[in-house]
Image: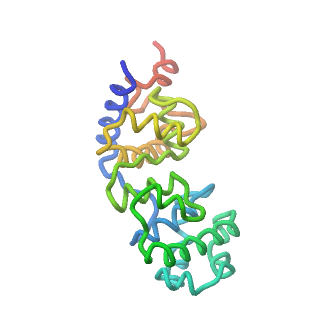
Amino acid sequence: MTKKQRAALAVEALKKEYPDAICSLTYTDPLQLLIATRLSAQCTDARVNLVTPALFARFPTLDAFTEGSVEEIEELVHSCGLYKTKARDIFAACKMLKEEFDGVVPDSIEELTRLPGVGRKTANLVVGDIYHKPAVVTDTHCIRICGLLGISEGKDPLKVENQLRAILPMDESNAFCHRLVLHGRAVCVARNPKCDICCMKEFCKYAKEKIKP
């Protein structure tokens, strides 16, 4: 079986298992998703969703952020960890959006990654969820599970992204990555994957090794 064939099976299996492929972060507009994703680095989405209501109530618009201060953002995002760096990046990104992008969150990975604190993971998420363009979000769940499946190799996010772009149907790739997050939390947990109840056990390289007859 080729990696492309295995990837196609994974896409279909996860689609049946998790029909609603949505982002775990709560947001109402492109700027909020951009900021929430920045806050999610080395932090759970659940924690971010507890923090953002107060943050977005205080800063409901891009102008509100640029007229505020790094210190006030720090105070509101403190519990997300790495709060000083995150607050500085959020403030700087908002200023850059206003000064260089006419206040509009850009729709390309190249432009998004020019923003302070925005890497390819965040850029792919925004491009996929907001602008509905082909995207591959290589977060920890994606990298780990695709490695176990045998459709990608290594742990470098960009290399894994490029490997997956070559084999995934691009109209399914964004939803596939969201479903991997759900699957990684519910079944393919990092410390002890529950291969016996996995919807992909019939074609997953790791599962076939683990549950040999």
Q: Residue 191: where, in percent of width, then height?
A: 60, 37
Q: Is residue 174 left or right of residue 139?
A: left
**Is residue 202 depicted above or below 36 in this figure?**
above
Query: Dividing the image into 4 quarters, which one contains the N terminus?
Result: top left
Q: Residue 51: where, in percent of width, then height?
A: 56, 71
Tell me where residue 117 sits by quadrant: bottom right
Q: Residue 84: where, in percent of width, then height?
A: 70, 69
Q: Which residue is rendered at x = 51% and y = 43% of the image?
A: 141
Q: Which residue is rendered at x = 35% and y = 27% of the image?
A: 4
Q: Is residue 67 left or right of residue 4?
A: right
Report if residue 111 is visible in the image.
yes
**Is residue 121 depicted above or below 46 in this figure?**
above
Q: Which residue is rendered at x = 59% and y = 65% of the image?
A: 116
Q: Which residue is rendered at x = 46% and y = 71% of the image?
A: 32
Q: Residue furthest front?
A: 100
Depth check: give the residue in front, 52 or 130. 130
Report if residue 46 is visible in the image.
no
Depth check: give the residue in front, 164 or 26. 164
Depth check: give the residue in front, 188 or 152. 152
**Is residue 7 depicted above or below 102 in this figure?**
above
